[in-house]
Amino acid sequence: MTAGQAPSFPVMTGFADEAAAGIDGQIEATRALGWRFIEARNVDGKNIHDMPDAGFDRVCEALEGSGVEINCFGSTIANWGKSVRDPFDITLAEVDRAIPRMRRLGTRMIRIMSYAVLPGLPLERQEAEERFRRLREIQKRFADAGIRVLHENCQNYGGMGWQFTLRMLEAVPGLELVFDTANPVNSLDYGRPAPYPMQSSWEFYEHVRDHVTHLHVKDSIFIEMVPGATFPKSRFTYPGEGHGDVRRILKDMLSRGYGGSVSIEPHMAVVFHESSPGGEAGARRDSYIEYGRRTEAMIRGIVDEIARGPAR
């Protein structure tokens, strides 16, 4: 990109299950934003690769002719709720269910993780090689089906710090990254000596940015660790109001000619790793739409700023 040239506005998408539980509400919220895509995760409380066939048929019927498509599956494959010590057949069954559904919807990206951090065990006992072996097989099966596999930094091996992500990428050729701006804020930095501090979103991003092909916009303020809990106590905010370095990361990505998509994951009205997700239906929808509009406005401002070039 030449100096003063405006970057391309990224494709916008989002976890519309935070706007509504059912597919009709998810489509409506997406259209209200003027967007074309949903990053599909749950419909009526079931992940899209695990829901019954009749439910999935209903999703396909609702999408047909709606002008809305699924550009990425936010799967639960190898996520923070799964252990690398579980039988691998469980994971492979999820992969095998996801592939035909993705083909039917024409979806070519899937979000996965690298299994939960094994609690209480030192770094050398996190079974990295077994994780990599499994990830290589997951990557191969999806790649053979023409599907791109993107790993998200979360409460998993790759999310323990940027050093772990880079080691994982070296061990799993073809794996891409989705970077979540708020997850480092709420994650211990195992790349530093114990007692582990919290991560920096900018530092993590700066080390892995060359591998990022999809971005989750989320922002939060860390409050405290919760003994025995997978996730700490945090307050989720609109983009730019927390500690996720959202604007700085977006500006850097766009300045570097980023050609991927940007997906909102507000976590403000509904937080999916809480035991009882709440949020009255109208508030969920309104919060999601407001989050999308604020994210678009931030990106529009960054695009204009880059196009104007440095101040003279």
Image (spheres, rainbow, N blue to C red):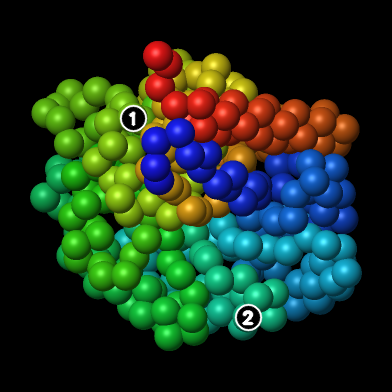
| Amino acid identity at mark 2 | Arg
- Spatial CA span between label 1 and label 2: 35 Å
- Residue behind mark 2: 103
Label 2 near label 1: C-beta < 8 Å? Answer: no
- Nearer the N terminus, badge 1 or badge 2? 2
Q: Secondary structure at mark 1?
A: helix
The quadrant in which residue 66 appears is bottom right
Give the mark count: 2
Q: Quickly name the residue at label 1.
A: 202
Q: Residue at x 55, y 51 (%)?
A: 261
Q: Give the x, y percent position of residue 7.
A: 51, 42
Q: Residue furthest front?
A: 312
- Left or right of 59 in this view: 156: left
Q: Residue at x 51, y 26 (%)?
A: 308
> For the C terminus, which image quadrant?
top left
Residue at the image position 82 percent from the left and 31 percent from the top? 286
| Residue sitting nearer the eye, 54 or 165 | 165
Q: Is residue 237 above or below residue 31?
A: above
Location of residue 49 with respect to 119 vertically, above or below: below
Marks 1, 2: nearer the viewer: 1
Q: Where residue 213 sits in the image (x, y, percent)? A: 43, 55
**Which residue extends farthest bottom?**
144
Q: Nearer the viewer, residue 81 or 61?
A: 61
Residue 104 falls left or right of residue 206: right
x and y, in percent, of residue 83 in the image: 37, 58
Between 51 and 68, the one lying in front of the other is 68
